[in-house]
Structure formats: C-alpha cells, structure tokens
Amino acid sequence: MNEVADAWVIVCSGAKVSIACSQAMDWVAARNGDKCQFVMREWIDEEQFRHAALLWVVDNGLPWNAVHFALRHWIPLLVPEVNVPMKQLCVSATCGLFYDGAVEAASCLTFLLSNEHTRRRLGENGYFYLTR
C-alpha cells in the first residue's frame, strides 16, 4: 500500500466531483474507514502526491498536468469511461482503469486498493509508456 499515516491516499483531479464519484467515495470510505483518504489535487503538494495510491479523475475534464505527474511517479489512473482521451490513455498504456457510474467507480477503487501488485503494475506501465 502506498502509505501516508497508514492510509491509502487517493488523489482526485477535476474541476467538479461528479455525483457518481461522490457516492463511490462514500461507499468506499464506509468499507475502509480510516484506511482511505480522498484529497483533491489542489489540496496537496507534489511530495504528498508522490505517495498516492492512485489518481482518480472525478469529472470529464482533461487534467493532463495531474495525469502526467502521476505517470511520471508510477501512480495508476482511474478515469471516467465517457472521458475518451483519458480512457484511451488507460487502454493504450495499460496504466489504469475506467468506470461508468458510482457502482463501477466503487468496484474499481475497491479492486485497486485491495490489489497492490496490480496497482504497482499499472503504475509501472504508465511510467514506461510516458518515458519511451
């Protein structure tokens, strides 16, 4: 687990958190208690971001700066399926998952947080995609 104070830190990026993402956050936080922290990208500095378990794009925007930073630091992505450029990046680079709605977002979060090996592999893939 990428840890800060023994918790998974999920960095969220987007101008506005969608209702589906808000619901997924509630469900995942209820299941994981204090082991799961959701923070907006703008709330943390780069050093804190480096320790994130994943970067979650919570709207249909294109937060390329945050995505580039995540890939450079081996951090996997979780993006909305309707965000075609972000989804295509996840598919092309095998660097993250995509979701459609609250249930899928919560399932993806739960899966990624429960599978450290997969998270690390997706982060590696993103880094190597970016640097080749």
Image: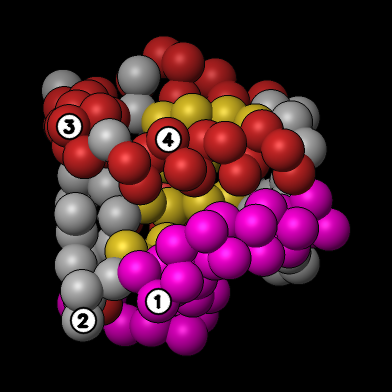
Amino acid type at mark 1:
Asp
Residue for badge 3: 117
- Image position of 49 (left or right of 51): right
> Mark 3 to mark 1: distance in Å?
22 Å
> Mark 1 to mark 4: distance in Å?
17 Å
Amino acid type at mark 2:
Ala
From the image, state whether disc 3 or disc 1 is nearer to you.
1
SS assignment for the magenta stretch, majority? helix
Q: Which sits earlier in the primary sequence, circle 2 or circle 4?
A: 2
Quadrant of the rendered structure where residue 106 is? top right
Range drawn in magenta: 18-47
Q: Residue furthest top?
A: 92
The label shown at residue 34 is 1
Q: Is residue 36 above or below residue 112?
A: below
Q: Residue at x 83, y 58 (%)?
A: 19
Residue for badge 4: 111
The label shown at residue 46 is none
